[in-house]
Structure formats: structure tokens, C-alpha cells
Image: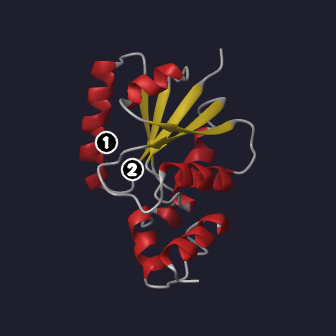
Amino acid sequence: MTRIAVVPGTYDPITRGHEDLIVRSLQLADRVIVAVAAQGGKTPLFTLEERVALAKGAVGDDPRIEVRPFDGLLVDFVRQVGGTMLVRGLRYVSDFEYEYQMALMNRKLAPEIETVFLAPAFDHVYLSSSLVREVARFGGDVKTLVHPVVAAALRKTLGTA
């Protein structure tokens, strides 16, 4: 049986922290599906199609990793792709409250799907998409924070080239 992990997020944009979480998820599963959420409760900088393309560019061509958009309930998407686990990153204690609440609701809706929390690599603890957007918006150097494809897209979209 193939173990499929789903790593959901808005990925606006995908960061080196996300990349690390995705690759490390391969230690838990045979395949990883990067689930790019259509709606994240905020207005994204990049369109859904752009976020999917940037995620594909950032994770490379590992055949065990697939990037797909989704809309609606996450557990419905996980079931649709044959997933058995959700992988979420926890940077801070403040992340835990929200993530724990979501994990319990997902368990209520789909008890067959497990949620696994991973701590970030030490050098990515501070990293978030919103901080990357802010640094890029003011012309800061983001080359160590995101994949070069993402850095180029940020410069183009924000006009900071």
C-alpha cells in the first residue's frame, strides 16, 4: 500500500521552510502531494495558478512529489487523492492552538486521516510567506528565503526588479 501524505497551504509564496517540510514528509510517506489552497482567508499576492507553478518550480522534479490545487474541505481533497495523513509545520507555540483545533475538526470529519506535526528546521523557524512578501515588497534580498524561481516572480509581481 502506498502511503500518501498531503502537505496543504496557500503557499503565497512557497518558502524554503515549506520546501524543507515537503521533502522531510517523504520520510513519513511514499508520495507527497503539495495541496495549494484556492482560498486562504486572505487576498493572495499570486493567483492560484501562479502559486501552483511556483510550488512546482520550487520542489523540482522528484516523481514522489506532486503539486495540485484544491478548493473546499481539505479532508475531501485528501480522500480524493487517496491520502492517509496531513503534514503540518509548527513554528511557534501560537501556531499550535490553531493547528490543533484544525486537526481535531479534521479528525471529526475524517477519522481515517491522521494529522502529523513537524517542527521546522532551525534556520527556517522565523520564515513565513507574509514576511517574505514584506521583505520583497521593500526590495530586500529574498534569495536565501525562497527558490530562485520564486524570487524572480516576487520581483516581477512587485516591480522591484
The quadrant of the image that shows the N terminus is top right
Location of residue 90 in the rendering, given as x and y in whole percent from the top left corner = 39, 50
Q: What label sits on residue 69 in the rendered view?
A: none
Q: Residues within 10 Å of mark 1 (few under 14, many from 20)?
A: some
Where residue 66 appears, as percent x and y from the top left, is 64, 38
Residue 128 seen anywhere in this rendered image of the structure: no
Give residue 29's position: percent from left, percent from top: 61, 30
Residue 99: which numbered mark, if any? 1
Q: Are marks 2 and 1 in contact (CB under 8 Å)?
A: yes
For label 2, the SS is: loop
Q: Distance of mark 2 from mark 1, alpha carbons?
A: 8 Å
User: Please, what secondary structure does the residue beneath circle 1 have?
Assistant: helix
Which residue bears the numbered disc 2? Answer: 90
Task: Residue 123: tell me if it is visible.
Answer: yes
Foreground: 33 or 46? 46
Indicate left or right for 156 with 61 as reference.
left
Residue type at mark 1: give it. Glu
Q: Residue at x 75, y 46 (%)?
A: 61
Identify which amino acid the numbered label 2 is placed on: Leu
Q: Quadrant of residue 111?
A: top left
Residue under the point 57% across and 48% down = 52
Nearest the camera: 160 or 60? 160
Left or right of 41? Residue 23 is right
